[in-house]
Image (cartoon, helix red, strand yellow):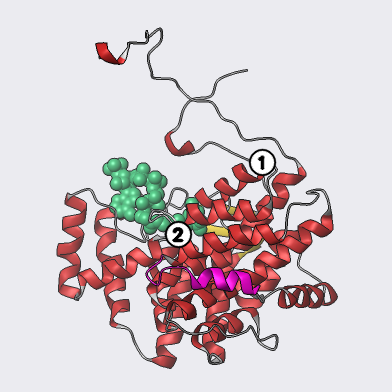
Amino acid sequence: MAVGEYKPGLEGIPATQSNISFIDGQQGLLEYRGIRIEELCRYSNFLETAYLLIFGELPTAKQFAAFVEDVNYRRRIKYRIRDMIKCFPESGQPMDALQSCIAALGMFYPLADLHDASFIYDATARLIAKMPTLVATFHLMRQGNDPVAPRDDLSYAANFLYMLNEKEPDPLAAHVFDVCLTLHAEHTVNASTFCALVTASTLTDPYTVLTSAIGTLSGPLHGGANEEVMRMLAEIGTIENVVPYLERKIKNKEKIMGFGHRIYKVKDPRANILQELAIKLFDRFGHDPYFDLAIELENQAAKYLAEKGIFPNVDFYSGLVYRKLGIPTDLFTPIFAIARTAGWLAHWKEQLADNRLFRPIQVYTGRHGVRYKPIGER
Ligand code: SDX
């Protein structure tokens, strides 16, 4: 077998074949099952988009109604999971809490037959349904409050905001949040999806697959960047500090959070949409001076980074939208996980359909023929 060339981070190396989503990094295009992300944001909603990603086609009205009902039915969490959340430290990282809960969930739904379509559908609907409830439950309980039960009369997005804030959201807020979920649902073989593929290829259960993916998403170079962007804007503080901050980071060869992408060498199309959503919220609910900092940072960063193909990515403006929706910063990445559950499950199903265990090789750089030396002689 021919040995391929080693590429750090597998840069440019195809790890799978997939027909779920497509990115053109030069044009700044993103398609889910061939449909441009801009069209899905304008005409669809997160649950319909999740159905499209997971089952391959937009649902008929009947199929969609059944999917919504199946998801709604599975929104509640068992009291044993709630009791487990009660034992988590108040200062615990929400992504750790989410990962622990998903791993625990698998104990209640043991692996059956991965070739059984009803097992796959049931696990899919359950994971899509429970992620928002788990995040909202952890948030209320870490404050010492009882969680609120999901409401089946509210949409997926509205219900999450309701469970989080204990009051029905403004329709515009619910719509904007729904679009954010669609924007974060899928993105080809990013680090957490690749991790999901590797775990899925061992034929373990879907709860374990998502536990792996959630852990990978939490890192600041991946899903954790949206929280880091808000910390960066707080550190910059004023418009006057933007250039000095940038110059210091560039000089120290430190990364600007929310900028750059392995595939996009132009501005992430999702950043453009999130920018528009932020403006819609500000027009309605009042301005956020952090937005002015972000715009200035983007304009100034272009002078240093544009020629390297480094522009804002999905994480640069998402935090500003969530902040205006009153969502705490440390829940930004868990929200990313709620949305990306659709993409992870779509890739899990696709991997199972033509599975081969992931087992790459390495370039060995170590020694050979070393003799064992007794401890007394070392
Ligand atoms: C997400 O993969 C996906 O699709 C992910 C995602 C999804 O939807 O799943 O899109 C979500 O994770 C978005 C990315 C969020 N992360 C951040 O915003 C963290 C900051 N970004 C960087 O860490 C970086 O841009 C990465 C990790 C996103 C991509 O980096 P690469 O492809 O590994 O590039 P690199 O680190 O090898 O950098 C190449 C050059 C270097 O300069 P030189 O050494 O060649 O001179 O570009 C520079 C880097 O220093 N560079 C940056 C930079 N990103 C790259 N310089 C300043 N600021 C940055 N953000």
Mark 2 CB within 8 Å of ligand 1: yes
Determine whether, in the image, residue 229 is placed left or right of residue 356. Answer: left
Amino acid residing under circle 2: Gly
| Label 1 packing within 10 angstroms: few (<14), some (14-19), many (20+) | some
Say which residue appears at 47% left-offset and 63% top-offset: 95
Q: Which mark is residue 201?
A: 1
Horizontally, is 86 left or right of 326 in the view?
A: right
Sort mark 2 into few (<14), some (14-19) or many (20+) by Cα contacts within 10 Å.
many
Q: Visible in this render: residue 26? A: no
Residue 84 among those drawn in magenta? yes
Residue 247 marker: none
Tag 1 secondary structure: loop
Quarter placement of the C terminus: top left
Of residue 349 and residue 29, the one placed in the foreground of this image is 349
Q: CA distance from mark 1 to mark 2?
A: 23 Å
Please state the extent of the stretch shown in magenta in the rendering: 78-92
- Residue that protrudes farthest toward the front in the picture: 376
Q: Quadrant of the N terminus?
A: top right
Q: Are marks 1 and 2 in contact (CB under 8 Å)?
A: no
Determine if the C-beta at disc 1 is less than 8 A from ligand 1: no
Rendered location of residue 101, percent (x, y): 57, 63
Label 1 is placed on what type of residue? Ser
Q: Is residue 193 left or right of residue 250?
A: right
Of the two numbered discs 1 and 2 in the rendering, the one whose residue sits closer to the viewer: 1
Q: Residue at x 43, y 55 (%)?
A: 222
> Where 274 sits versus 14, above or below?
below
The residue at the point 71 percent across, 73 percent down is: 74
The residue that disc 2 covers is 223
Return the x and y of residue 234 as percentages of the image width and height: 25, 73
Indicate the position of residue 100 as horizontal and vertical percent values: 53, 60
Answer with mark 1 or mark 2, whichever residue precedes in sequence.
Answer: 1
